[in-house]
């Protein structure tokens, strides 16, 4: 294969990487030019106007680059496998590359709601590099390439979490995320090394063939468990979730939105491929009447613990971002149910659920960002009386919260119905009924704290009137439009879920 043909296959990643370099160059050049012309010593309004203009130009270029990359994804061939699975082009991989680009696009739009984001070029370049990591993750079926994608994504997200130098909580979030993330990378790499030592290969399809021909061995079991533990850190599954609340609360809001959405989607896609393709011969069983050793009971235990811990601890939160963090732990548990169910239907249900959850959470963080912009905080008290200040944001937040709670006719309801029905059909004699029961109990618990957010928005009155209504701030128009589009998407996918479920089911082999 010629380099030109190879470049065509990696054109989406190449376009996003070049866009990141261009945005970075523009950001650095603009700041240096401002320093030379004396803008840095000008009056604060002049400096603020220059910062907004620079951020707007960088955001426009970043968004345009993502749109071009999305077009390049659509033009990829249907099926190509190169270098023993290091680069795999399939309808499923292309679909989720497109979804990752869409999540990055909305993150770029939400960045516009930040008040005078310093170093906008550098920040947006890191977002784009993280997007390249997501696309490498999604587009590979080889463990070493997956690890490279994880590290590119992880390093970018650590910097994004700690980007706000004016807020000590951002530095704390970045440090905790880095420490936990590096630990998870160590677990993952050591697990991969053991799997390679026992199978002699790092390609998922080849690993599956080797495992099918050999008997279970202790070192192989240790390697599989360590790999699963490493990914449990990435998806914030309990008890490996302790980094998530501080990272979600302390990081800049667009960073938290991207960490909670894009990285979760890519991680679940890769985790599903690893367990359902690479580790398929050692699946085992999590059925209550036919428990069998394998990765399935490990994921089932993680799912049940995540659902219980996430929902119960979320009840005690008074900060909306921390509430969304513990809610993310619970939703990670729900998604794991699809992988435990296994098969084509289980994987499809998990991918559908994690996708709609990601778009819902980006929208919820968008509302949090706009409220924080105007009130200076994101506690329940900052949402008091939001319906009187901005009916649009109040309605959008209601859609997001009710969808997360699984209320029809929103997308979250169909996602949970899809997951639970697949789990009930998996195996014989409804062996996963116990896991579905835990998930239903968690859903009932979650309804309380989601309704508490809506109570703050629609019922509680603010102690003091807002100094400036949210809905007349012109600089946030783009972010509010993005939030409205996301809310409409959640509503549409609830009314017509086949728009997304159909392509996912058709793409899953």
Image (cartoon, rainbow, N blue to C red):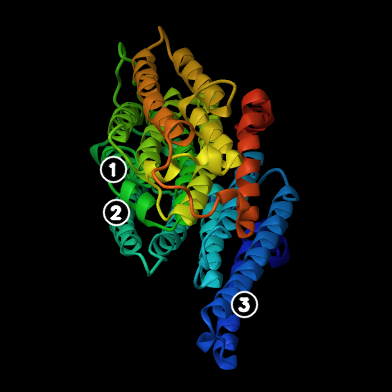
Which label's residue is closer to the chain start, 2 or 1?
2
Residue under the image location 40 percent in, 59 percent down: 161
- Disc 2/disc 3 C-alpha distance (Å): 33 Å
Tell me: residue 370, above or below residue 60: above
The N terminus sits in image quarter: bottom right
Q: Which residue is mark 2?
A: 180
Residue under the image location 39 percent in, 31 percent down: 452
The C terminus sits in image quarter: top right
Q: Position of residue 402 (x, y in %)?
A: 50, 28
**Which mark identifies residue 26?**
3
Q: Quadrant of residue 302?
A: top left
Front position among marks 2 and 3: 3
Instruction: Name the element at disc 2.
Output: helix
Q: Does any portion of residue 113 appear in the rendered image?
A: yes
Instruction: Name the element at disc 3.
Output: helix
Viewer-proximal residue, 433 or 46?
Answer: 46
- Categorize mark 2 by other alpha carbons within 10 Å: few (<14), some (14-19), many (20+): some
Q: Quadrant of residue 431?
A: top left
Residue under the image location 41 percent in, 10 percent down: 430
Q: Position of residue 21 (x, y in %)?
A: 59, 72
Q: Which residue is mark 1?
A: 240
- Categorize mark 3 by other alpha carbons within 10 Å: few (<14), some (14-19), many (20+): many
Q: Position of residue 393 (x, y in %)?
A: 57, 41
Report whether 86 appears left or right of 474: left
């Amino acid at each position: 294969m010629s380099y030109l043909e190879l470049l065509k296959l990696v054109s989406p990643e190449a376009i996003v990487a070049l866009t990141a370099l261009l945005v970075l160059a523009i950001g650095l050049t603009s700041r240096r030019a401002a320093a030379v012309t004396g803008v840095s010593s000008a009056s604060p309004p002049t400096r603020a106007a220059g910062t907004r203009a620079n951020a707007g130009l960088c955001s426009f270029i970043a968004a345009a680059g993502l749109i071009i990359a999305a077009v390049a994804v659509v033009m990829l061939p249907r099926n190509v496998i190169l270098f023993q699975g290091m680069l795999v082009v399939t309808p499923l991989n292309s679909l989720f590359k497109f979804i990752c680009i869409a999540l990055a696009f909305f993150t770029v739009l939400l960045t516009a709601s930040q008040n005078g984001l310093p170093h906008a070029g550098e920040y947006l370049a890191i977002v784009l590099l993280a997007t390249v990591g997501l696309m490498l993750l999604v587009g590979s079926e080889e463990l070493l390439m997956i690890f490279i994608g994880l590290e590119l994504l992880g390093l970018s997200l650590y910097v994004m979490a700690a980007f706000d130098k004016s807020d000590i909580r951002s530095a704390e979030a970045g440090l905790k995320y880095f420490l936990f993330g590096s630990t998870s990378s160590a677990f993952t790499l050591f697990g991969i090394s053991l799997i390679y030592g026992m199978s002699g290969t790092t390609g998922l399809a080849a690993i599956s063939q080797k495992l099918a021909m050999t008997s279970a061995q202790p070192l192989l079991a240790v390697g599989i468990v360590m790999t699963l533990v490493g990914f449990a850190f990435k998806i914030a599954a309990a008890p490996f979730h302790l980094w998530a609340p501080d990272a979600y609360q302390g990081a800049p809001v667009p960073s938290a939105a991207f960490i909670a959405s894009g990285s979760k989607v890519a991680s679940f896609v890769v985790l599903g491929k690893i367990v359902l393709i690479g580790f398929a011969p050692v699946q085992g069983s999590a059925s209550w009447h036919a428990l069998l050793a394998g990765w399935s009971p490990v994921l089932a235990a993680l799912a049940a613990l995540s659902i219980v811990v996430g929902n119960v601890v979320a009840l005690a939160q008074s900060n909306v971002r921390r509430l969304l963090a513990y809610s993310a732990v619970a939703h990670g548990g729900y998604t794991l149910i699809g992988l435990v169910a296994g098969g084509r239907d289980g994987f499809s249900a998990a991918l559908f659920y994690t996708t709609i959850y990601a778009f819902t959470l980006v929208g919820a963080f968008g509302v949090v960002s706009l409220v924080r912009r105007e009130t200076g905080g994101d506690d329940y008290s900052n949402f008091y009386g939001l319906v009187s200040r901005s009916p649009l944001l109040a309605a959008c937040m209601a859609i997001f919260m009710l969808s997360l709670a699984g209320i029809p006719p929103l997308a979250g309801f169909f996602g949970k119905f899809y997951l639970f029905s697949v789990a009930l059909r998996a195996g014989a004699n409804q062996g996963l009924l116990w896991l579905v029961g835990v998930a239903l109990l968690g859903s009932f618990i979650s309804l309380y704290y989601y309704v508490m957010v809506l109570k703050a928005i629609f019922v509680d009155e603010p102690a003091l009137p807002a100094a400036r209504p949210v809905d007349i701030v012109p600089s946030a128009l783009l972010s509010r439009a993005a939030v409205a589009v996301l809310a409409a998407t959640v509503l549409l996918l609830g009314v017509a879920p086949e728009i997304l479920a159909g392509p996912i089911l058709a793409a899953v082999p």
